[in-house]
Image (tube, rainbow, N blue to C red):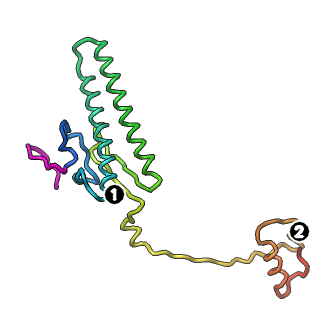
Amino acid sequence: MPRPTSGKRTLEPSEPWSGRGIQRKYYPAADGKSPPPRNCKDRNDRIKTEFLTAYYRLNRSYARLLEIRGKKIGDPARREGNERTALQRIELALRHRDELEDEYAPYGIIAEPVMKNGFAVNVKFSFGSVRSKAQRNAHVLSSSAYISIPLPPGGKPEGWTFPGKEELLRRLNSRPGANQGIR
């Protein structure tokens, strides 16, 4: 369902912003589209909803901070206390968002917000379990080369240690015209 640009509309019960007290203008888009339904069955849509809700809380908290800072009247001590409370709510929202990132990052799930005037207006998602179009169109190519590098005259690999040394020495000694007895 496309996002409304203006005017009133009836909210569907499945929309994530249809709950009591939800202000739609602070709910970010998901990959430039409307958020997934609140009770969706798809795993990726549920994860999107979790991140979008976290960014919604950040947006609401930031809007409240701006509102408090915009008020120049009233008791300065009370304004300072309100600002402290708003900053603490932002901190809690940031911690929650960080916990989500930590939870889903090992699975290759990344939620990258697009910010405008301090508000997350869109969240771009990438899922490690979903191959991108570029990945689907890619072809695996492999090549190898054998490069022979002769030892300098009189050079002997005595005292050299590395995995496969014995096999290398056997091959060097078995070549026609090779110095026999390299150890």
Crowding around mark 1 (Cα neighbors within 10 Å: few <14, some 14 to 19, many 20+) is few
The vertical placement of 67 against 175, above or below, is above
Looking at the rendering, which quadrant does residue 121 occupy? top left
Q: What is the magenta segment's predominant secondary structure?
A: loop
The vertical placement of 50 against 181, above or below, is above
Label 2–label 1 contact, CB within 8 A: no
Identify the residue at horizontal 26%, vertical 45% (top origin): 28
Identify the residue at horizontal 37%, vertical 56% (top origin): 126
Q: Could you tell whether 22 is left or right of 166 in the image?
A: left
The vertical placement of 97 against 111, above or below, is above
User: Mark 2 is on which residue type?
Assistant: Glu
Q: Magenta segment, which residues?
A: 1-14
Q: Could you tell whether 31 is left or right of 137 in the image?
A: left
Query: Label 2 to label 1, Cα distance in Å?
Result: 60 Å
Q: Position of residue 44 (x, y in %)?
A: 33, 57
Identify the residue at horizontal 22%, vertical 14% (top origin): 73
Q: Position of residue 122 (x, y in %)?
A: 28, 48
Instruction: Confirm whether the magenta stretch covers residue 8.
Output: yes
Q: Is mark 1 on a helix, strand or loop?
A: helix
The vertical placement of 48 against 57, above or below, is below
Identify the residue at horizontal 88%, vertical 65% (top origin): 159
Disc 2: which residue: 158
Q: Position of residue 34 (x, y in %)?
A: 22, 52
User: Mark 1 is on which residue type?
Assistant: Arg
Camera-nearest residue between 101 and 158: 101
Instruction: Confirm whether the magenta stretch covers residue 125.
Output: no
Disc 1: which residue: 43
Name which of mark 2 and mark 1 comes first in the sequence: 1
